Image (cartoon, grey):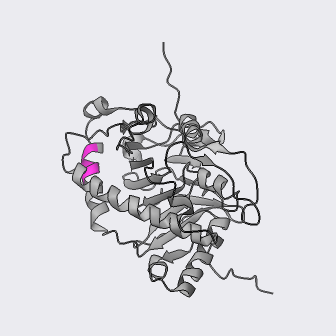
Amino acid sequence: MAPQVPSTPVVPVIDLGPWRSGDPSARARTAARVDEALRAAGFLLVTGHGVDPGLPARIREAAGEFFRLPAAAKQPYAVTVGGRGWLGPGAEANSYAEGEPSPPDLKESWSFAADEPTGVPSVDAEWFRPNTWPAEVPALRPLVDEYLGLMRALSDELLELLAGALGLDEDHFTRHTSHPTWGFNLNWYPGTDTVGPPLPGQFRIGAHTDFGTVTVLDRQLGSGGLQIHTDADGWQDAPYDPAALTVNIGDLMARWTGDRWRAGRHRVLPPPADSPSEELISLVYFYECDPHIRVESLPAPIGRVLHDPVDSHAYLRGRLDAISVPTTSE
């Protein structure tokens, strides 16, 4: 007897059009597909998002100008994980978040984060500091500012969709995003002709889950690209649709739903040996929530596990600290 084929893929393409239509039956169908996918893998492909593909293309072009500068020109912008600026080679090892030491990730990043102060000095000093912009590439700032506005609006819309998928009031999550924290990384994955052959166990990004509520990723297709992990299939190449943004939920949202949904476990493969010049740039928007929200697991029948309540940002800080590669001193 032939094996049964699932009625929907593990990572479906979700068109936001039916959700936005206001039609109750169309919204219900969309919400049910989202719930099913997030239970299985924690990932979605989202179309109908309204982001002009020309905008991320222009951001990649400008970011590439910076990343290809000599290291000495980039060094003045160097920061550690959680900072605003250039994360150079060797700064991160994402597998540490799972307790698995590995060589540093084979990437460089320019990191931005929330920068509009709340007026609470202790909160602003940690979570709402000014962003840094590379003076060598003045074209980058207006492009990123435009993109960040789109990502904030889209992320709130996705949180409304997630609430609908759980049968909750649409503002169940967005009532906690009036002044949220977020992070935005431009990740540069150079080829082996730049970084050399990977060490054993070394990836462009090691296996991990993201930390916040939702992550919105604009990525390029490549041999050394994104893989996702499911219990049923192990590691598989992530499906790709050039019209779609890749969305996954993070640890904080998984806790919030009482593990009904799983944080999307993923990694980015090493640069391929047979394509030494492959270079990719990903645009990664990490959405979180307002500072110091008490996150409590939704009870049954929605949730499956009652986690101890956590302070959202004490939790996030611990996760960020975990992936920082320790520096050694003489």
On the image, the x and y values in percent for residue 44 come to 54, 68
On the image, the x and y values in percent for residue 227 come to 56, 59
Residue 158 visible, this angle: yes
Residue at image point 58% right, 40% down: 319
Residue 221 visible, this angle: no
Which residue of the protein is positioned furthest toward the top in this rendering? 330
Q: Is residue 103 left or right of residue 16?
A: right
**223 or 28, which lies in front?**
28
- Number of marks present in the image shown: 0
Location of residue 49 by image quarter: bottom left
Q: Is residue 47 left or right of residue 97?
A: left
Location of residue 125 by image quarter: top left
Residue 64 is inside the magenta segment: yes
Examine the rendered structure and indicate whether residue 15 appears above or below residue 315: below
Examine the rendered structure and indicate whether residue 170 appears above or below residue 122: below
Residue at image point 49% right, 24% down: 327
On the image, the x and y values in percent for residue 140 come to 24, 50
The N terminus lies in which quarter of the figure?
A: bottom right
On the image, the x and y values in percent for residue 145 come to 28, 53
**296 or 238, which lies in front?**
296
Which residue of the protein is positioned furthest toward the right in this rendering? 1
User: Majority secondary structure of the magenta segment?
Assistant: helix
**148 or 274, which lies in front?**
148
Residue at image point 31% right, 61% down: 56
Examine the rendered structure and indicate whether residue 194 appears above or below residue 62: above
Q: Is residue 149 left or right of residue 160?
A: left
Residue 325 is inside the magenta segment: no
Look at the image and give the residue range highlighted in magenta.
62-66
